[in-house]
Amino acid sequence: MSSLTDLTLCQAAAGLRAGDFSSRELTEACLARIETLDGELKTFLTLVPEATLAQADAADKDLIAGRKQDVEALPPLLGVPIAVKDVLAVAGMRATAGSKVLENFVPPYTATAVQRLLDAGVIILGKTNTDEFAMGSSTENSAYETTHNPWNLARVPGGSSGGSAAAVKARLAPAALGSDTGGSIRQPASYCGVTGIKTTYGRVSRYGLIAYGSSLDTVGALGRDAQDVSVLFKLMAGHDPKDATTLDVPVPEVALNGSEKIGGLRVGVPKEYFIEGIQPGVETAVRAAIAQFEALGAEIREISLPYTAYALPVYYIIAPAEASANLARFDGVRYGLRVPDEDMIQMYKETRGAGFGPEVKRRIMLGTYALSAGYYDAYYGQAQKVRTLIKQDFTKAFEEVDVIAAPVAPTTAFPIGEHSDDPLAMYLEDVFTLPANLAGVPGLAFPVGFDGENLPVGVQLMGPIFGEERLFRVAHAYQQVTDWHRQYPPLMVAG
């Protein structure tokens, strides 16, 4: 390894336990790389280096003591630095959700998913950039800055977890947390060439996640490979009494040992995901990955998910409707931005007008319309019925196959600004990721090649409810015989 920042999450944890380097050395290496590269990449919104290094020093004391006594009793990720998407609360650290309305909000509480990782010993490097309130597919909707793709600075990193994905690929952090409401982990994972998990709805607590669409939001993670992501998943997952939507279901042990076998596994390939207009380089790389699954012993079956075509309109009724309700709390009264005015109603209007960006306003208006009297049954009610049909598609499919393999997105990373004036074109970038959120099933994205412009292509595996372990095993088997996940952008190799 040429640098500590080359280490994966698991390699970093093992090195710290062995005493090969200190947490301070590893953390300082990440912070130095952030200082060198993030002026161009713009992946972080908030850094607190002094507090971060204080955490590292405390971890080092525990590591030294643990090596003398029982190293196996130490927290599994003690001293490992990670990044957190700025829609997850960390007590005492600014949480903006990429919005001016929360520019100076410092939560007094920590999201459960983050707290469980803190309990496992991680150090928080900082908060990563996001589309405002996670509403976007490019991280261009952030109120603060546009994140750039490490493979080509003129391209988007995907969204809304674009800051997290770009930070992991550029080796500013070994891993990062994200959220996925309609593809916001999987799509940037594909665009940046990292591995990202969208968890089963109810598998990881949403307590402390700034809400967008409450029936769709999931907390997940991005890392260099399936092994790293599986470790974060195992630590975060499980029932939380602070979130009534989490399910009290045992979390399986996910121990990937490098000898995963997928012989006999049934892999479904939905014909609806290979549509007219898909970029040829994307289809070529994804089909090659499916062929590799077959070479590893999997059985490939073509399947149909007939209601896929309705996922886009259904999502853009349900998600904005839920956003319209969730974002009503940002009114300038209790926290966040307030534009002073003696008239209370005018204060509401001016605060929300100044605090929200164009995309958030668009979705609030769409959602409010869909929920309004006279339109509720025609739009929101109908969308929920079709959502049920989409979920039934997956239920039937998983009676025939074990996992489903499909492209993550119809294209690779597009140029910054290309879809700025065309919301529909932007929404279409998520056409392949939305169904999993509507159905509540897990999805794992990982790199499987490049297009003609040397931009990463990702595949997504989808599994049945609580089927994350199966997805990790397939991806890990694939990553043992390929090296796409080990490829790094030429711009970012040095240092």
Image: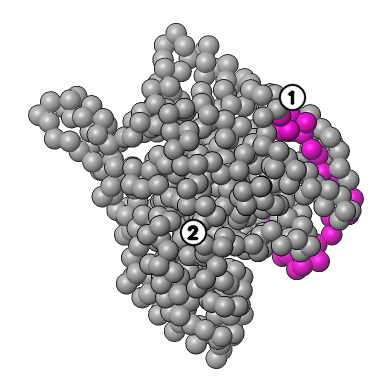
Between 490 and 368, the one lying in front of the other is: 490
Pointer 1 local density, CA inside 10 Å: few below 14, some 14–19, many at least 20: some
Answer with left or right where residue 308 lies relative to residue 128: right
Query: Spatial distance from mark 2 to mark 1, Cα to Cα?
Result: 37 Å
Q: Which mark is residue 175?
A: none
Is 260 magenta? The answer is: yes
Q: Which mark is residue 167?
A: 2
Majority SS type along the magenta span? loop
**At label 2, which amino acid type do we have?**
Ala
Instruction: Please determine whether, in this image, residue 78 is positioned above or below residue 154.
Output: below
Which callout, 2 or 1, points at the residue further toward the start of the chain? 2
Pointer 2 local density, CA inside 10 Å: few below 14, some 14–19, many at least 20: many
Which residues make up the magenta segment? 252-275
Answer with left or right where residue 119 lies relative to residue 470: left
Q: Which residue corresponds to mark 1?
A: 306
Is 18 magenta? The answer is: no
Residue shown at 84%/59% (left/top)?
261
Q: Position of residue 69 (x, y in %)?
A: 56, 89
Quarter placement of the N terminus:
bottom right
Name the element at disc 2.
helix
* Residue reaching furthest to the front: 452
Instruction: Please determine whether, in this image, residue 306 is positioned above or below residue 72.
Output: above
* Residue reaching furthest to the left: 342
Labels 2, 1: front one: 2
Tell me, what colour scheme is on the image?
A: one colour
Q: Is residue 427 visible?
A: yes
Q: Is residue 250 visible?
A: no
Answer with left or right where residue 134 lies relative to residue 456: left
